[in-house]
Image (cartoon, grey):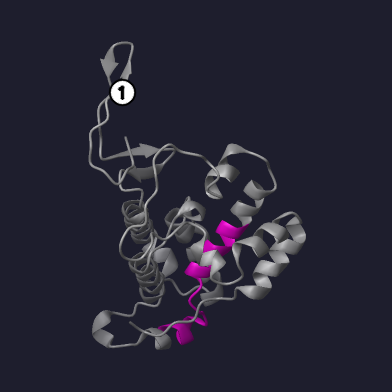
Amino acid sequence: MKISRQPTPVTIKIDQKQLENVKYFKYLGSLVTDDGRCTSEMKSRIAMAKAAFSKKKNLFTSKLDVNFRKKLVKCYIWSIDLYGAETWTLRAVDQKHLESFEMWCWRRMEKISWTDYVRNEGVLIRVSEQRNILHEIRKRKANWIGHVLRRNCLLKEVIEGKIKGRIKVTRRRGRRCKKMLDDLGDRRGYCHLKEKALDRIKGRNCFGRDCGPVVLTDY
């Protein structure tokens, strides 16, 4: 599979056999698409997480303590949804999908139907929660990028864009494509993140201090 701006076909032969050109494929449990985006993988993960919630619905909606049920949801359901999330490049529409899934979990856990006309703020007050799923992704991404930046490897050079190519890069019209670390750079900057990554403890403490839970209104 080739990820490129141009839709030109690619011919790759191994032992005189041409490899098939595909639009997507599964690799280590994650869905990789030819457009280089994580939207399809994220939607697939959300569907699997909702299916897992439905299988254990009696447990999550039982009369157990709310705090205990929240821990079960984050441990069992969110782990399915956020598998590999540290490598996602989230656009605004992707963030809305994740936030909707987060509210879906709390509404199903408290048996709140959409016909009850309960706003998201009211649901969060009932479960004593804030919008945390995007913060959890930023936390995982910061921890993962810290491991990468503490090593001198090819992946580090790829992330920092130091791989030289023969294709001349020209400026395109419109807004530039969002990069994987842009959501971290919005808060404290990549240089600051790279500096703190050299010390694992300081890096984690810095992340916890600078990036708190995300609190948003209804959309």
Whole-percent x, y for residue 99 in the image: 40, 71
In this view of the protein, which residue sits in the foreground, 122 or 204?
204
In the image: residue 139, left or right of residue 7: right
x 30%, y 43%: residue: 34
Q: Which residue is mark 1?
A: 12
Q: Is residue 131 magenta?
A: yes
Mark 1: amino acid: Ile
Q: Residues in magenta?
A: 123-142
Give the quadrant of the C terminus: bottom left
Please state which of residues 167 and 179 is positioned toward the viewer in this rendering: 167
Q: Quadrant of residue 107?
A: bottom left
Please tell me how crowded label 1 is: few (under 14), some (14-19), or many (20+) other residues with Cα within 10 Å: few
Residue 141, given in percent of the width and then of the height, sits at 56, 57
Front position in the image: 77 or 167: 167
For the stretch drawn in magenta, what is the main secondary structure?
helix
Q: Quadrant of the N terminus?
A: top left
**Magenta includes 59?**
no
Q: Is residue 113 visible?
A: yes
